[in-house]
Amino acid sequence: MWWSCNRNLNAFQLRSMRQVSGMLGACVAITCGIRAVSDWDHLSLLTRTVVSVLTVVPIVGTLLIVARYLARETDEYLRNLVVRSILWAFGVVMVTDTVIGSLAQYYPLHLPFGLLNMDIFVVTGMLALRLQLRSSE
Amino acid sequence: MKNRLRVLRAERQWSQADLAQKLEVSRQSINAIETGKFDPSLPLAFRLARLFETTIEAIFLEGPEQEQAE
């Protein structure tokens, strides 16, 4: 995903982007894993709970990576853009969740949309950052 | 907030990239400051003033917001 953001990244920014992309990959893998496991009837409640808690790992990881990035980024303008992008991403995730939550009251939704929150967050955040950086070109 | 960054930079024949390198910030930061999209923090304003060997007031001009407040 880092390639979509900016080609002029320094080593630290590139490393942070790669780590966030790794977390996104982990999130996708965990989501697929949960989908596969959900079909197994013989799993205990404890196993299902552990697998469900695993979904938090990429979210916490992403938050830690972003927090460390913001703490170490010396360019205040980029810091400002990243914070704005995070706000956009949070906004899109909340709006998406609310709309899907409302739709779920009327229609049976079989897909685990809640598990996609992290993916929506990262993709929206990177897209928002890219668009803001483009406006500063 | 308006500023004279573009003029001061042009006087020295520096590109945005040159100025960004001297200040250790991104070129996008310089562009955002020049176009008034972003107001730098006080430490960065001081660094700009020191680099151009002038005062902060000589670089950044009072905008309409300040005039209205007065």
Image: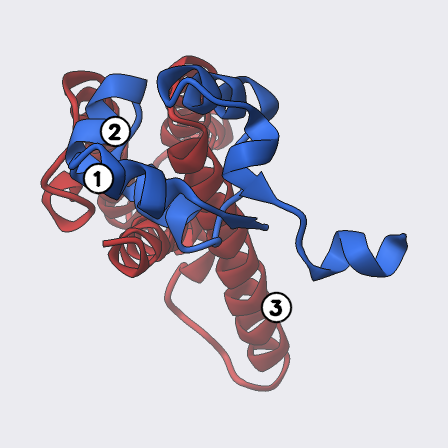
Chain colours: A red, B blue
Q: Which mark is residue B51?
A: none
When asked about the image quadrant of residue B24, the answer is top left
Callout 2 secondary element: helix
Q: Name the residue under label 1.
A: B16
Q: Name the residue under label 3.
A: A98
**Residue at (61% x, 68% y) in the render:** A98
Pointers 3 and 2 in contact (C-beta within 8 Å): no
On what subunit does the disc labeled 2 rest? B
Residue A67 vertical placement versus A37 (above, below):
above
Q: Mark 2 points at which residue?
A: B20
Pointers 1 and 2 in contact (C-beta within 8 Å): yes
Callout 1 secondary element: helix
Measure the C-alpha gap from mark 1 to mark 3.
43 Å
Give amino acid for label 1: Gln
Disc number lying in front (3 or 2)? 2
User: Residue B52 appears at what percent x and percent y?
Assistant: 37, 23
Give amino acid for label 2: Ala
User: Residue A122 appears at what percent x and percent y?
Assistant: 34, 46
**Nearest the camera: B56 or A112?**
B56
Measure the C-alpha gap from mark 1 to mark 2.
6 Å
**Residue at (57% x, 67% y) in the render:** A95
User: Residue A16 appears at what percent x and percent y?
Assistant: 25, 24
Give amino acid for label 3: Thr
When asked about the image quadrant of residue A79, the answer is top left
Figure disc tally: 3
**Nearest the camera: B39 or A79?**
B39
Residue B66 vertical placement versus A70 (above, below):
below
